[in-house]
Image (cartoon, rainbow, N blue to C red):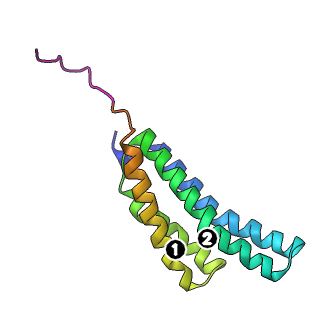
Amino acid sequence: MQRWKRRGTWARLGVLFACYLLLPALTTAAIGLFSTPDSGMMLFILMLFIAFPLATIALAAWDAVKEGFTALWIVMPILFFIAPTVIFFNESALIYGAIYSLLAVTANKIGSLFHSKSHSTNSPRES
């Protein structure tokens, strides 16, 4: 099966996109209900520096262990980060999307080292 057609990779990328959209939405809702504006800024900074990178690294490494290395993790994190940047942040946050893509491709490459390759039994081994 071609790498682009595997559902597992697209499911993990969908979870990443959901994290990129839901975490800022929940943070915005929590700021409105419970905290002051200064602590809200701190929550957004923690999200940019801790939550998003950890989610990106975890999902990219998990995908690599399950499916192997794919080039999708080079492009998709920055594409997915455009929507939250427009909605919740400003354009100066786009650099973080590029950083998340670098983290994702690194984690995907390292995780692919632990990917167990299937062995074909269609042809006999030569002795």
Residue 123 on the magenta segment: yes
Between the C-alphas of marks 1 and 2, the distance is 7 Å
Q: Which residue is mark 2?
A: 48
Q: Is residue 48 above or below residue 126?
A: below
Q: Residue furthest right?
A: 34
Residue occupying the point 58% across, 61% down: 17
Location of the C terminus by quadrant is top left
Q: Which residue is mark 1?
A: 96
Q: Quadrant of residue 27?
A: bottom right
Residue occupying the point 81% across, 70% down: 29
Residue occupying the point 60% across, 84% down: 90
Pointer 2 local density, CA inside 10 Å: few below 14, some 14–19, many at least 20: some
Q: Quadrant of residue 28?
A: bottom right
**Disc 1, disc 2: CB below 8 Å?**
yes
12 and 95: which one is in front? 95
Horizontal side of 103 relative to 17 (left or right) equals left
Residue 25 spot, x, y in % from top left: 73, 69
Check residue 80 in the rendering and tell me which mark sits there, or answer none: none
| Kind of residue indicated by mark 2 | Leu
Q: Quadrant of residue 41?
A: bottom right
Pointer 1 local density, CA inside 10 Å: few below 14, some 14–19, many at least 20: some
Residue 45 spot, x, y in % from top left: 66, 74
Residue 76 spot, x, y in % from top left: 46, 63
Region in magenta: 118-127
Mark 1 falls on what kind of element?
helix
Residue 84 spot, x, y in % from top left: 61, 73
Q: Earlier in the sequence, mark 1 or mark 2?
A: 2
